[in-house]
Structure formats: C-alpha cells, structure tokens
C-alpha cells in the first residue's frame, strides 16, 4: 500500500484540516495530525463517520448525507506528495464508496472508489483508504460514487498545496474560501434514482445550493422566508482565493460575484493563464480557482450567484443559488436584481471555455514549468470517437449508452477480476466508434496501450450539456466546436497550451477532443459526470497494463473487501487501520507530541 505508516519516526506538526484559525478555536474532534518521516513523505489521518442527518437547505427538513455530521463534509487540506489515510465508517443503510474527483492515485487504482475498482463498503462496516497525492497540486472534491448518493450530499473539498520549494504563480492570497454549488432536489436520492430508472426526467431542481445552504431572499416572491443562506465575510482591500466546485447532479451553473472580477488562476490541478472574467460557466464535476480582490466601496453587501445555464423554461428562472459577500465595513444588506446573464447562450460559453489556457511557464508539483511536457509533439497511438445519445429502451429498461453500449457493472470489480485472473467478468472490446448494430448492455472496457497517447473525441447527440471525467489522469482539452467531428477538425486543435484537467464539458450538438498520455497503470473509470446519464450506463473503463513487472505499482491492499465471485475470501469485517498502532513513534517523539498537545490545550484556555 505504498510507504507504510510504520516507517514514521517523528511528529512533525499539528494542523487543522481547513483554513488557519486561532488556536483558541481549535476543535480537537475535527483536528488532523501530520506525522513526518525522515525517510518518507508526511501522513495525514482522518476518521469519518458517514450517516444520514437532518438539514433544511431549502427551508423544509429533509435527510441528507453528512460526514461527521457535517454537510458539506470536511476539507482535505494537504500538500503535494503527502499520504492521506481516511477511515470511513458507513452508518448509512446501503453500501458506500467515495471517489476522489481528479486525484490521480498514481499506480494505485485500488483506492479510486468506484464500482470497477472496489467492492462497496457494506452498511455498518468501516474501510480505510490510503493514497498519496503524488505530483499534484490544486482544487478537487470527493463524493459518494454509488446508488445516486451524491444527490443527497456526502461531498467535500480537497486542497493540494504547493510544496514550499515551488512558488505560486501569483501572490499569496489573504484567505482561502471553498464554494460548493449544486442543483438540489427535496426528493430523496432513493426516490430520484427510482424516477431515473423508470424514465422520469429529473426536471427542474427545487433549488440551487451554495455550501449546502439555500438562497438569500433577494426576491420575496421567489424565495420564501426563513431559509438559512451562506454569508462569506471578507475584509476590504484583501484578495481571497475562491475554490468553486460544481458538485451537483445534472445542471451547468454560472458563477459570479456582483461587481467583482474573477481572476482565473487554476482548474483541477493546472495553473492557467491569468485572465479576468465577470462570470464563469462551471459544468457538473468541474472545479475552478479564482483570485477575487475586495476592491468595492461596500455601500451594501454583494450577491454571490450560481444560476442554471442553457435552460429556457420559465420555471428555471425561479431557481437561483444566492449567497452574500459581506465586507466588514458594509453599510447595508444586498438588494435589487441579481447581476444579469443570458441564460441560453452556448456560443458565449464555448468561447469562454476555449479562452482557458494552460500557464506553460508556471511550475506546479515539480520545479519544471507545466509546458515542458509538449503534448502537441507526441504521436497519437489510439483514437476513440465516443458518441452519446439520449435515454433509450434497451432490454425493456431505460438506459444511456456510449458508442451503443450501456455499461453493466459486474458483481466482481474489474480490478479484482484482473488481479485474480478471473475470466469472463469483462471484455477488452470497447469499440473506437459507434458500430452499426442495436444498442446493448455489456461490460466492455477500453484496452489502453501503456505509455500510449490516446485521442478521445466526445460527440454529444443529446439535447443537454454533458460533462465527462477520466479517473487517474489529467488530459489536455485541445478542441471543441459545434457540429460533427471529422478528421479535418484536427486542424483547429490547440497543440500548445490547451488546459490539462480531468473533467470537460460537451455542448449539445457539439464535440470536444482531448489528448491523454496513458502512463498510469491501472483500471480507470471514464464516465459521464451528469449523475442521471452515469447511473443509466454512460461509463466505461480504460485498462492500462504495464507489460513489464513494475515494483513500484501498488499491490492488492491488505484490507481489500471481496464481493461477487470472490465473496468467499471476505472475513466478517474489513480490516481497519488502527491509528494508535499506525505510527511507530520513539519514546522521545511521544514526549514531544504529548508536550505539544498540552501546550495547545493550555493555549486554547487563555
């Protein structure tokens, strides 16, 4: 499982899993500690209990999924190359897995937390994830990957900070603010998934949430009284880094802050060319970082808005997420109309997406500049044109497809079947284009070439924006346009500074092209981020096998859960990491640690 925790020799630091706060505010229930090793990278430990809690995001009580009774869940705040250990206790009434959106899990797809790599954590069990954020920086999020559970919450942020030796390509912000925007339904996730199975469209959401809260009452005719809303407190003249994630299930959202510019600096682990935007379309599963300077006169508070995009029904105009940006010297509450936006302008949105460029001169996880990997000079080895279509009836069930195949998850995860050489669980025959045959249910997987260079074109024949995500990698978004992709479309590709990210949007009646270097051995999920499309079959996996024995590839974890064909190997309870035994700390280090705890407690009572 990578560097073992038993190698740890010395206590290094005690940090909160969020923004720096005065020690008097430290809650020891949620603290994390980092243990440094002379020989290895630091470890950080989290203990999570996942359960249903009661919340009222839109004013009426409903059941949501909380982590340690928080909704949204805690922030994982780590630094490049740290090892992350998350012990998850499943107190839901159904199986659970967490996936770490954008975390690459180098040579370790065992920790990816999707049905193709992991058996689910049964209700009442706990299981421990252990992974390294190897050679990554940036803004990401995690969420539950099974059973439509993301529609009930269970999500939270991941921050991977630069190592001290790698400077930021901008001045150090005065604060770090996480923003989670999402469409939201008051119907339970179980009810929603049943609707989707029965061919019932999700329809207009009941609201748009910002950080789990409903809208500020900007319009008394549209927003009922009594809804709790998010207030972001800021100081005039200071600059804050806003990390904004669309954690919703199906709706593209436009994010904007009244009278403030959004200086884009990073998206999903890549520093970007720094450009000002008045607003940004953020599609399902995408993450962005903006620097926002508090340069207004604070005559009133300001609106923070997340509103639906590309919808033309009057019902949607009533659905806006609204929070409040509050300067410490504000002279009154926010009022008046929300900052305006053309709700159905896909051309504007596509041009905006094309304008996002990779900062090829900035260092990130390593000292060399991002642009030192000249992806435009690499010869493509495999080409896949992946076509999606609207929901259709297959074998009497409502299903979605990619290239005419609706993915059928096997009872035995693909990665376990590969490990134990079990035949017949999946086939390495996913077609590289739409075949002239009826759509079908199948467990068909892409056979990737290790260290090959793959071109994937997503062609969207649906009527809504879809976004697609690839686990295990950052890919280069090199082109997008309306119409049907052809070989001639390559002449429009950006082969110099196309941004590297893990989730890209594909507009209706349009295509998006990506390039990805398959240097990360494992089995990796390629999926629609729109939850209804994903749940009904719009996914596959890319199998990337190193033909040589690789001593650095992570072996089968000792605490693996077994299911399907391998169920007989499973013990009554999955092994958990015992934090009290996970560190081999010398007597002198223990003394230092105890003295540190005593000092912190003493400080907190001053």
Image (cartoon, rainbow, N blue to C red):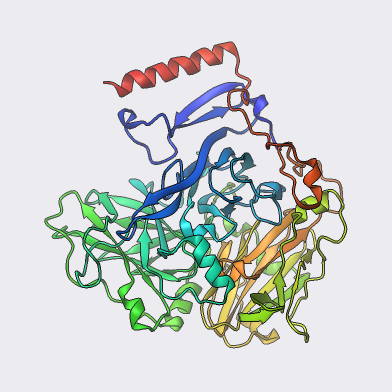
Left or right placement of residue 167 versus residue 439 in this view: left
- For the point 54% across and 34% down, the residue is 45
In this rendering, does residue 271 appear at all? no
Left or right placement of residue 333 versus residue 187 in this view: left
Residue 441 pos. (x, y %):
74, 73
Q: Nearer the viewer, residue 14 or 362?
A: 14
Q: Nearer the viewer, residue 240 or 463?
A: 463
Q: Nearer the viewer, residue 197 or 337?
A: 197
Count the marks: 0
Q: Quadrant of the N terminus?
A: top right
Left or right placement of residue 258 versus residue 269 in this view: left
- For the point 46% across and 55% down, the residue is 153
Q: Nearer the viewer, residue 84 or 13?
A: 84
Q: Quadrant of the C terminus?
A: top left
Residue 227 pos. (x, y %):
26, 58
- For the point 52% across and 61% down, the residue is 190
Residue 426 pos. (x, y %):
81, 63
108 is higher (above) or lower (below) than 150: above
- For the point 60% across and 67% down, the residue is 534
Q: Quadrant of residue 514?
A: bottom right
60 is higher (above) or lower (below) than 160: below
Residue 342 pos. (x, y %):
34, 81
Which residue is situated farthest in the left direction here?
A: 331
In this rendering, does residue 284 appear at all? yes
């Amino acid at each position: 499982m990578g560097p073992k925790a038993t190698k740890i020799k010395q206590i290094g630091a005690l940090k909160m899993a969020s923004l720096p706060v005065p020690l008097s505010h430290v809650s020891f229930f949620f603290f994390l500690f980092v243990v440094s090793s002379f020989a290895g990278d630091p470890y950080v430990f989290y203990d999570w209990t996942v359960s249903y809690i009661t919340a009222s995001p839109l004013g009426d009580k409903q059941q949501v999924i909380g982590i340690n009774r928080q909704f949204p869940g805690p922030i994982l705040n780590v630094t490049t190359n740290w090892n992350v250990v998350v012990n998850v206790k499943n107190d839901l009434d159904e199986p659970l897995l967490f996936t770490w959106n954008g975390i690459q899990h180098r040579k370790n797809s065992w920790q990816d937390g999707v049905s193709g790599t992991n058996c689910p954590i049964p209700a009442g069990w706990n299981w421990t994830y252990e992974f390294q954020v190897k050679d990554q920086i940036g803004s990401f999020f995690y969420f539950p990957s099974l059973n439509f559970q993301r529609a009930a919450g269970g999500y939270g942020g991941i921050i991977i900070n630069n190592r001290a030796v790698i400077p930021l390509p901008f001045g150090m912000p005065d604060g770090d603010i996480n923003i989670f925007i999402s469409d939201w339904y008051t119907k339970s996730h179980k009810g929603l998934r049943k609707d989707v199975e029965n061919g019932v469209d999700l329809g207009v959401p009941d609201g748009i949430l910002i950080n789990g809260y409903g809208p500020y009452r900007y319009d008394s005719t549209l927003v009922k009284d009594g809804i709790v809303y998010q207030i972001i407190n800021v100081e005039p003249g200071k600059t804050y880094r806003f990390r904004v994630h669309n954690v919703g299930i199906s709706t593209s959202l436009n994010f904007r802050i009244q009278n403030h510019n959004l200086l884009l600096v990073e998206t999903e682990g890549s520093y970007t060319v720094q450009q000002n935007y008045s607003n940004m379309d953020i599609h399902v599963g995408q993450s962005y970082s903006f620097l926002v300077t508090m340069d207004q006169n604070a005559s009133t508070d300001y609106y923070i808005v997340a509103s639906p995009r590309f919808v033309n029904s009057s019902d949607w105009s009533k659905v806006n997420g609204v929070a409040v940006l509050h300067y410490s010297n504000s002279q009154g509450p926010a009022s008046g109309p929300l900052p305006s936006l053309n709700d159905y302008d896909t051309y504007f949105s596509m041009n905006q997406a094309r304008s996002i460029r990779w900062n090829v001169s900035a260092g990130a996880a390593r000292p060399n500049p991002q642009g030192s990997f000249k992806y435009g000079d690499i010869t493509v080895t495999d080409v896949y044109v992946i076509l999606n279509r609207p929901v259709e009836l297959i074998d009497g069930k409502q299903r979605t497809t990619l290239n005419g195949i609706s993915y059928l998850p096997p009872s035995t995860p693909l990665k376990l079947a590969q490990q134990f050489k079990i035949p017949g669980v999946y086939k390495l025959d996913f077609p590289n284009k739409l075949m002239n045959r009826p759509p079908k249910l199948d467990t068909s997987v892409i056979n990737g070439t290790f260290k090959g260079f793959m071109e994937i074109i997503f062609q969207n024949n649906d009527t809504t924006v879809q976004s697609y995500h690839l686990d295990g990698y950052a890919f280069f978004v090199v082109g997008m346009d309306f119409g049907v992709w052809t070989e001639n479309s390559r002449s429009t590709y950006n082969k110099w500074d196309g941004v590297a990210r893990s989730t890209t949007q594909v507009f209706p009646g349009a295509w998006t092209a990506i390039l990805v270097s398959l240097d990360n051995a494992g089995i990796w999920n390629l999926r629609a981020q729109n939850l209804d499309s994903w749940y009904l079959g719009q996914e596959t996996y890319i199998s990337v096998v190193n033909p040589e024995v690789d001593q650095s590839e992570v072996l089968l974890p000792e605490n693996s859960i077994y299911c399907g064909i391998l169920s007989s190997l499973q013990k009554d309870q999955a092994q958990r990491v015992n934090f009290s035994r996970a560190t081999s700390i010398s007597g002198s280090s223990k003394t230092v640690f105890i003295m540190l705890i005593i000092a912190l407690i003493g400080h907190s009572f001053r």
